[in-house]
């Protein structure tokens, strides 16, 4: 007789719902991925020039730390800038 032993491995739906709800709740104060994508090239260039992006675009910076997708986009752009920089 074989019984599945992984019942405890599953996350209860309630917990997931609470997580999603708490994420949505904080969304209003943050910017969306679309907004970040719209300015990420300016953000990278500003940072590359040594400007204080955390002061200039704090919400973008904040989003970048939370959002893996946007962070990857940022790193890809930064990589391109660094490769194109003759110095
Ligand atoms: Zn994002």
Image (cartoon, rainbow, N blue to C red):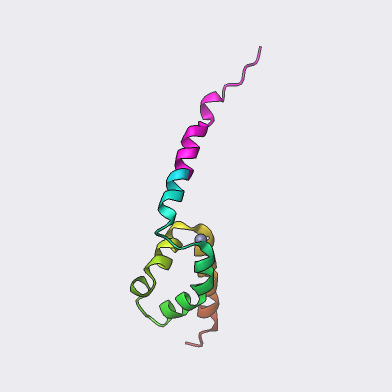
Q: Is residue 85 above or below residue 30?
A: below
User: Whole-percent x and y of residue 33?
Assistant: 52, 63
* Magenta highlight on residue 14: yes
Q: Is residue 24 above or below residue 43?
A: above
User: Whole-percent x and y of residue 82?
Assistant: 50, 79
User: Can residue 11 be seen?
Assistant: no
- Could you tell me which quadrant the N terminus lies in? top right
- The residue at the far bottom in this view is 86
Q: Nearer the viewer, residue 4 or 87?
A: 4
- The residue at the far top in this view is 1
Q: Is residue 2 above or below residue 24?
A: above
* Magenta highlight on residue 13: yes
Q: Quadrant of residue 47?
A: bottom left
Q: Is residue 5 above or below residue 50?
A: above
- The residue at the far right in this view is 1
Position of 47 with respect to 41 (left or right) is left
User: Whole-percent x and y of residue 44?
Assistant: 47, 75
Residue located 42% across and 45% down the image: 22
Q: Quadrant of residue 73?
A: bottom right
Q: Nearer the viewer, residue 29 or 81?
A: 29
Residue located 50% across and 74% down the image: 39
Residue located 49% across and 38% down the image: 16
User: Can residue 30 be seen?
Assistant: yes
Residue located 49% across and 62% down the image: 32
User: Whole-percent x and y of residue 5?
Assistant: 57, 21
Q: Which residues are magenta?
A: 1-20
């Amino acid at each position: 007789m074989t019984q599945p032993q992984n019942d405890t491995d599953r996350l209860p739906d309630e917990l997931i719902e609470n997580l999603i709800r708490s994420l949505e709740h904080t969304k209003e104060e943050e910017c969306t991925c679309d907004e970040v994508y719209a300015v990420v090239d300016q953000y990278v260039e500003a940072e590359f020039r040594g400007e204080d992006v955390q002061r200039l675009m704090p919400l973008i910076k904040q989003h970048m730390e939370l959002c893996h997708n946007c962070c990857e986009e940022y790193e890809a752009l930064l990589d391109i800038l660094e490769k194109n920089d003759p110095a």
